[in-house]
Image: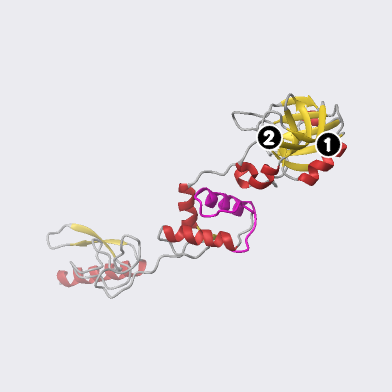
C-alpha cells in the first residue's frame, strides 16, 4: 500500500539522519515543518527537560558554581587569593609594599626591602581590621585594598633613612674635583676627573628654605662650625653658596628624611663626611642638580 511505502521512506530518512548527525525537517500533524537535531540519541518527548528551551545540565548560581538551593549539591569553594609576597621575600616590590604599610601606620619601621617578622605582623593587623584572613602574607586581595588606601611611594619614602642608589652624574660633574649632589636620588658623589671616589646619603632644605641648584665652588671650610642664625652644630661644614654648606647632621642620622635642613646639604654618615672634609679643598666645584 502507498501508506506502507511512505512509512518505510520516513524510517529510512530518520535512520540516515541518525548516522550523519545533520538537521532534518519533520512534518507535524498540520503538514508544517520544524527543524529537529538528531544526534543518534533518543529524542526527548515534547515538553521534557533537555529541549532547546531548558537545557538538562545542572543550574548555576550567580558565581558560576554548580548546584542550586535544595538540590543537595554544594557550590565549589572560591579559589584562595594568590600570595604575592611572604616572609623571607626580598626586593623593590617588597620595599614598596612596606612603604604603603607605613603610610597607613601599620608598619612603624622604615622600608628595608626584606619581608621580615614586623612586616608579617603589620599585614596581619591590616587584614584583621578589614575582615580579611589574618595570614600575614600579602595576597592579591590584601594588596588591592592596600593600594586603594595609599599612594605610590616617593623615592624618599622608599629610603627614608638613606641607601637609595646614586643617580647618574650630571655632565658638569665629569671633569675636575666635584661634589656632585643629586636632588633626585638624594645622594652626593665625590668625583675626581669623572671617577666616583665615594658616595653618601644627603637631604636638603624644605620648600620654605630650599637648597640652591647650580654650579658653585667651596669657598670656606669649618670643622667645628656652629650656625650664627640657628645656633645649631654644623660639623665638617664646606660652604658653597652664602650660608649653605655640605655638613654632617645628627638630626638626619636620627630622623632620616622625615626632617629637613634650613637649606644646607645634610650628610647622614659622619665617618663619610669626615673623610670627605679631609679631601675637599677650597675652590673645588659643587654641582647641585635634579
Helix, strand or loop for disc 2: loop
Residue 91 included in the magenta stretch of the image: yes
Residue 30, how many percent across, how many down? Answer: 12, 59
- Decide if residue 168 is on the left or right side of residue 193: left
Please name the residue shown 71% across and 34% down the image. 265
- Decide if residue 108 is on the left or right side of residue 277: left
Check disc 2 and report the residue beneath it: 183
Question: Vertical placement of 196 versus 112: above or below?
Answer: above
Q: In which quarter of the image is residue 240?
A: top right
Residue 252, how many percent across, how many down? Answer: 67, 43
Helix, strand or loop for disc 1: strand
Question: Vertical placement of 77 versus 253: above or below?
Answer: below
Question: Vertical placement of 183 versus 113: above or below?
Answer: above
Q: Which region is colored magenta?
A: 87-112
Please name the residue shown 49% across and 65% down the image. 135
Front residue of this view, candidates 228 and 53: 228
Q: In which quarter of the image is residue 173?
A: top right
Number of labels in the image equals 2
Front residue of this view, candidates 113 and 274: 274
Check disc 1 and report the residue beneath it: 191
Residue 181 included in the magenta stretch of the image: no
Q: Residues within 10 Å of mark 2 (few under 14, many from 20)?
A: some
Please name the residue shown 33% across and 72% down the image. 74
For the question of whether residue 195 can be seen, the reply is: no
| Picture quarter with the C terminus | top right
Residue 123, how many percent across, how many down? Answer: 51, 59
Amino acid at each position: 500500500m502507498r501508506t506502507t511505502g511512505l512509512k518505510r521512506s520516513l524510517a529510512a530518512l530518520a535512520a540516515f539522519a541518525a548516522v550523519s548527525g545533520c538537521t532534518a525537517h519533520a512534518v507535524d500533524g498540520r503538514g508544517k515543518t520544524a527543524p529537529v537535531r538528531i544526534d543518534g540519541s533518543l529524542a526527548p518527548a515534547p515538553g521534557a527537560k533537555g529541549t532547546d528551551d531548558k537545557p538538562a545540565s545542572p543550574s548555576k548560581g550567580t558565581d558560576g558554581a554548580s548546584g542550586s538551593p535544595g538540590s543537595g549539591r554544594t557550590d565549589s569553594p572560591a579559589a584562595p587569593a594568590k600570595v604575592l609576597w611572604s616572609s623571607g621575600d626580598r626586593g623593590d616590590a617588597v620595599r614598596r609594599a612596606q612603604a604603603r604599610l607605613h603610610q597607613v601606620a601599620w608598619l612603624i619601621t622604615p622600608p628595608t626591602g626584606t619581608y621580615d617578622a614586623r612586616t608579617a605582623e603589620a599585614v596581619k593587623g591590616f587584614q584583621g581590621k578589614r575582615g580579611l584572613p589574618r595570614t600575614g602574607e600579602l595576597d592579591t586581595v590584601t594588596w588591592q585594598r592596600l593600594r586603594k588606601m595609599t599612594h605610590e611611594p616617593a623615592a624618599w619614602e622608599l629610603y627614608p633613612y638613606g641607601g637609595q642608589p646614586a643617580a647618574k652624574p650630571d655632565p658638569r660633574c665629569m671633569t675636575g674635583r666635584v661634589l656632585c649632589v643629586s636632588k633626585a636620588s638624594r645622594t652626593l658623589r665625590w668625583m675626581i676627573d669623572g671617577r666616583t671616589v665615594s658616595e653618601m646619603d644627603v637631604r636638603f632644605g624644605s620648600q620654605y628654605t630650599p637648597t640652591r641648584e647650580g654650579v658653585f665652588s667651596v669657598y670656606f671650610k669649618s670643622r667645628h662650625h656652629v650656625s650664627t642664625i640657628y645656633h645649631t652644630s654644623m660639623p665638617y661644614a664646606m660652604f658653597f653658596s652664602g650660608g649653605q654648606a655640605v655638613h654632617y647632621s645628627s638630626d638626619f642620622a636620627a630622623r632620616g628624611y622625615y626632617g629637613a635642613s634650613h637649606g644646607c646639604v645634610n650628610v647622614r654618615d659622619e665617618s663619610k663626611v669626615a673623610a670627605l672634609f679631609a679631601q675637599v679643598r677650597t675652590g673645588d666645584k659643587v654641582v647641585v642638580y635634579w
